[in-house]
Amino acid sequence: MVFHLHKNEIEVKRQPKVSNLKAGFWESIRSGFGKNNTIQVIETPSSEEEEEEPLPEEFVLVEKTQPDGTIEQIIFSSGGDVDVYDLQALCDKVGWPRRPLSKLAAALKNSYIVATLHSRKFSLGEEGNAEKKLIGMARATSDHAFNATIWDVLVDPSHQGQGLGKVLIEKLIRTLLQRDIGNISLFADSKVVEFYRNLGFEPDPEGIKGMFWYPMY
């Protein structure tokens, strides 16, 4: 699946501090949010001047109070801070086959952008004792000029259905656009084709066919 977009086709605007997720992929890219009205997004305001190469972000994306009174924060980060053991555990939860930890570490290190979601739970007055738990990740590789490919999009099953996967993808795309990379592709399992189609991706645009080479042994 390939997503074609040139930077001059879209205007990325400064985001408000708090906004509801709203419908429409292009509208959401302009504002930087997902599409379902299911959660509140909390963001730090952007700086006055956009840098040519935006620095990694980290901010509270969602904050909600659990029935037992504890507070859960969902923290978004594009800084690539991922523990490979935590990532392997998350892959196990979504049923992905295990991959060697050394290769997982190499894949993360050589990615252009690694976006993560962490859950942070605490009681009032005990914020300092909270521990972050990895609940989502998506990464992109790139030639740093024209093209990028999105890989390994996953969200903990206990946090699915809240629009978090859409937010991960949209944040990745928005960051790539800010870096003037407008040809974005991904490989999608047949079960999630509609998920990506709803985000603006097209299978085989303009007759393009993906081709694969595998070792013959």
Image (cartoon, rainbow, N blue to C red):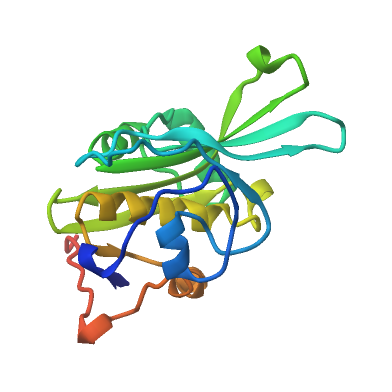
The residue sitting at the front extreme is: 48
Name the side, left or right, on which 156 lies relative to 5: right
The vertical placement of 121 against 65, above or below, is above
Tell me which residue sits at (40%, 35%) in the image: 57
Name the residue nearer the viewer: 48 or 103.
48
Q: Residue at image x 24%, y 43%? A: 112
User: Residue 25, position in %: x, y?
Assistant: 46, 68
Q: Position of residue 206 (x, y in %)?
A: 22, 85
Q: Quadrant of the N terminus?
A: bottom left
Q: Between residues 142 and 105, which one lies in front from this camera angle?
A: 142
- Residue 160 point in image, percent of width and height: 63, 54
Q: Residue furthest right?
A: 68
Residue at horizontal 30 percent and vertical 66 percent from the top: 10
**Residue at the (74%, 30%) spot, across then down:** 71
Residue 45, image x and y in percent?
46, 38
Judge whether residue 147 can be spotted in this image. Answer: yes
Farthest bottom residue in view: 207
For the C terminus, the image quarter is: bottom left
Residue 44 placement, left or right of 74? left
Q: Nearer the viewer, residue 210 or 215?
A: 210
Q: Nearer the viewer, residue 212 or 200?
A: 200
